[in-house]
Image (tube, rainbow, N blue to C red):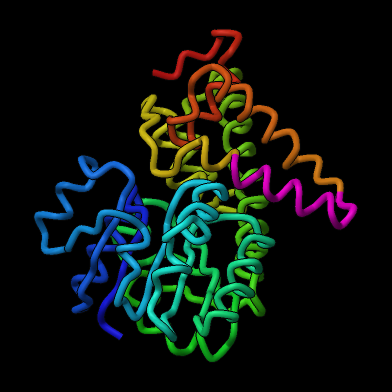
């Protein structure tokens, strides 16, 4: 399978497309705003006028859009992917979205003789650039095996989770863990600064020990510099946490840490900071202006 349609070419999507091209795949893309992908178009990919057109005559269609409503639109909209995909095509949704929506897509695809896989990713912009993403896959095991070479072009840690929707549930578990780790980093270094310690020195001491995490390693230095450029948007993290909260409530789970972190992030988004990176959570702890980090 060499002909791929790729719908949704954002911060991570661009690197994913480039890595597919490096592995010899012929890629056609569609993005809501064409001007944002002019750089990729100059690198040998083709342009489609719509998500449906992007799916036509493609053996594989990958989607990497923003929100569940966007997933619904590109798949179920009139003339969308499900309408236009060629028989026996593989539809891979790599958006982090509702597990229930992934199941709906899978069921509808199956009725039409199509293969559907949910395969959300984690690893941020750096993982996407280095083809080192973790890819969490739900769907039929046979479909997973068929698409594995494509996944290997974009990721390094590729793990089959189970039936349709399982990839999304695994991603929810990932985001729940990140919420705790990210807030822990913010609180640790807010505490250190308030006690008069040098954050860089504390970072050197604790980041390599039991307190260390990828959140600390990747985001704490950005916090120290006041660098809030997004590797992963705060608004998308909020979306993920809300999905996780909904799924948890369905199982009668009370996830207090997740709820608190979501509340803090929502407050920042209300202040217009949703387009910043997740490391901007540190700004919640700076509200009293006693901690000037820059």
Residue 122 at what x, y percent from top left?
Answer: 49, 59
32 or 203: which is nearer to us?
A: 32
Q: Which residues are magenta?
A: 239-253
Question: Is 196 situated left or right of 293 in this image?
Answer: right
Quarter that holds the C terminus: top left
Instruction: Identify the residue shown where x is 42% and y is 52%.
Output: 124
Question: Does the magenta segment cover residue 269?
Answer: no
Question: Is 142 situated left or right of 276 in this image?
Answer: right
Task: Examine the rendered structure and indicate whether residue 169 appears above or below residue 126.
Answer: below
199 or 257: which is nearer to us?
A: 257
Taken as a whole, is the magenta stretch helix, strand or loop? helix
Q: Is residue 208 visible in this depiction of the protein?
A: no
86 or 250: which is nearer to us?
A: 86
Residue 101 at what x, y percent from top left?
Answer: 63, 60
Instruction: Identify the residue shown where x is 47% and y is 63%.
Output: 94
Residue 195 at what x, y percent from top left?
Answer: 60, 19
Q: Is residue 254 visible in this depiction of the protein?
A: yes
């Amino acid at each position: 399978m060499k002909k791929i349609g790729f719908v949704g070419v954002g911060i991570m999507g661009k690197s994913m497309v480039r890595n597919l091209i490096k592995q010899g795949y012929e890629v056609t893309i569609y993005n809501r705003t064409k001007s944002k992908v002019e750089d990729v178009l100059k690198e040998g990919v083709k342009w489609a006028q719509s998500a449906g057109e992007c799916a036509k005559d493609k053996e594989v269609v990958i989607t990497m859009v923003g929100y569940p409503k966007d997933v619904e639109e590109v798949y179920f909209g009139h003339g969308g992917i499900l309408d236009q995909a060629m028989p026996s095509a593989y539809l891979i949704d790599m958006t982090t979205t509702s597990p229930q929506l992934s199941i709906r897509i899978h069921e509808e695809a199956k009725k039409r003789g199509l293969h559907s896989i949910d395969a959300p990713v984690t690893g941020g912009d750096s993982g996407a650039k280095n083809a080192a993403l973790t890819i969490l896959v739900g769907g039929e095991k046979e479909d997973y095996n068929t698409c594995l070479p494509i996944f290997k072009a974009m990721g390094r840690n590729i793990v089959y989770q189970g039936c349709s929707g399982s990839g999304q549930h695994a991603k929810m578990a990932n985001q729940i863990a990140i919420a705790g780790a990210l807030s822990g980093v913010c609180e640790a270094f807010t505490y250190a600064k308030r006690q008069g310690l040098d954050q860089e020195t504390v970072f050197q001491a604790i980041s390599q020990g039991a307190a260390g995490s990828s959140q600390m390693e990747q985001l704490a230095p950005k916090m120290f510099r006041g660098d809030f450029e997004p590797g992963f948007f705060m608004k998308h993290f909020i979306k993920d946490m809300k999905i996780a909260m909904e799924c948890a409530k369905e199982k009668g789970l009370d996830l207090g840490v997740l709820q608190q972190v979501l509340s803090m992030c929502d407050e920042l988004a209300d202040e217009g900071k949703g387009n910043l990176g997740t490391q901007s959570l540190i700004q919640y702890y700076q509200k009293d202006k006693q901690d000037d980090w820059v």
